[in-house]
């Protein structure tokens, strides 16, 4: 049997304001980029108060990254410089590859009752793909497969494969896996991720043990669990249900030059991107 993959670190999401004043929780960001490679940033937004999110994220650029938006409640209206527009609703995912550059806005609208709950993850692109054509992979809730294991565990597969079932998001250079896992009390989840890959869990609800009971106490909601590089993922829900995201990807292992919504490899590339944005020639591809 494979060795258990050990937990490397545990941290709590912290409240911040982003966009035009949106209140959210920053799960990780720039200071953790090296150890989270190929992932750059993750935000968790959850509120029943419209004033926390309604001002949204007005027009802004991205280059050199992918942004992944996954909704559990409410909706987000989006539009961009390529004439794309639409709505991401509860259970939907949008995997946007900014590549060479895109300018867009994301405006949360909430559910009928005013609730808003979702996540945005930023993934880096390697140098050879930084200037690729922008693209979208958008999938509705009905297109995201959900599997049930014998012990009552439910797994929604956004990207990657588990138990022979693949998620709808395909052909992403960092070979990611993005799972939403719900576990009943007293159940156990075992899962293999390739050795050397970055793996983390983010607890949405409940609590559990994320390697062995001897090493770690019951980890609670809004905690980020970062794993070591090798071994079997072993998670136990104890006296309550457990709901978490499990995300992994292949590290890029390249230098990062990052400011705001643009991530390149060198300071010169970063300065060029902002100069192009100021001069109006940022976009390399149009509709």
Image (tube, rainbow, N blue to C red):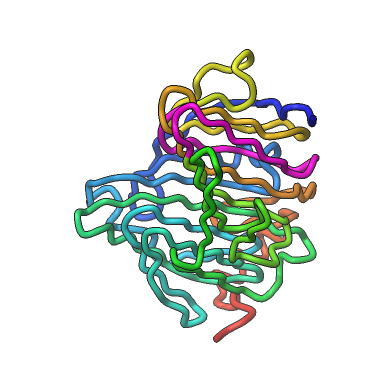
The location of residue 278, given as percent across then percent down, is 54, 69
Q: Nearer the viewer, residue 275 or 209?
A: 209
Please tell me whether residue 128 is drawn above or below residue 44 in the rendered image. below
State which quarter of the image contains the N terminus: top right
- Tell me where the magenta segment starts and ends, as one range: 183-207
Residue 87 sits in quarter: bottom left
> What residue is at 65 percent from the left and 41 percent from the top?
33
| Magenta region includes residue 272 | no
Which residue is rendered at x = 58% and y = 43% of the image? 246
Tell me residue 83's x, y (percent): 47, 82
Where residue 212 appears, as percent x and y from the top left, is 63, 20
Q: Main secondary structure of the magenta part?
A: strand
How many numbered circles are shown? 0
User: Residue farthest to the bottom?
Assistant: 287
Q: Is residue 70 left or right of residue 200?
A: left
- 51 left or right of 24 in image: left
| Residue 7 image offset from top left, x and y in percent | 65, 26
The C terminus, quarter of image: bottom right
Side of 153 where 268 appears, left or right: right
Residue in front for this viewpoint, 274 or 60: 60
Q: In the depicted view, which residue is nearer to us: 202 or 66?
A: 202
Front residue of 233/52: it is 233
Q: Residue at x 72, y 56 (%)?
A: 175
> In the image, is 56 to the left or to the right of 238?
left
């Amino acid at each position: 049997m494979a060795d258990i993959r050990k937990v490397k670190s545990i941290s709590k999401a912290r409240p911040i304001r982003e966009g035009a004043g949106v209140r959210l929780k920053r799960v990780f960001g720039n200071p953790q980029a090296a150890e989270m490679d190929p992932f750059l940033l993750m935000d968790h937004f959850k509120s029943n108060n419209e004033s926390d999110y309604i001002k949204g994220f007005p027009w802004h650029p991205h280059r050199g990254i992918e942004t992944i938006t996954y909704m559990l409640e409410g909706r987000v209206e989006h539009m961009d410089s390529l004439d794309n527009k639409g709505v991401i609703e509860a259970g939907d995912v949008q995997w946007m590859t900014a590549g060479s550059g895109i300018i867009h806005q994301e405006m949360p609208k909430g559910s009928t009752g005013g609730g808003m709950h979702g996540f945005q993850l930023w993934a880096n692109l390697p140098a050879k793909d930084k200037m690729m054509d922008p693209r979208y992979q958008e999938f509705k809730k009905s297109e995201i497969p959900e599997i049930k294991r014998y012990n009552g565990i439910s797994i929604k597969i956004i990207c990657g494969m588990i138990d022979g079932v693949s998620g709808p998001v395909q052909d992403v250079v960092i070979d990611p896996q993005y799972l939403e896992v719900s576990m009943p009390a007293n159940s156990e989840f075992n899962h293999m991720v390739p050795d050397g890959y970055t793996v983390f869990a983010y607890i949405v609800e409940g609590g559990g043990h994320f390697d062995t009971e001897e090493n770690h106490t019951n980890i609670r909601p809004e905690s980020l669990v970062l794993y070591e590089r090798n071994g079997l993922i072993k998670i136990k829900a104890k006296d309550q249900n457990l709901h978490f995201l499990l995300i992994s990807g292949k590290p890029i292992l390249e230098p990062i030059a990052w400011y705001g919504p643009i991530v390149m490899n060198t300071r010169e590339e970063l300065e060029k991107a902002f100069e192009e944005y100021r001069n109006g020639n940022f976009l390399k591809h149009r509709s």
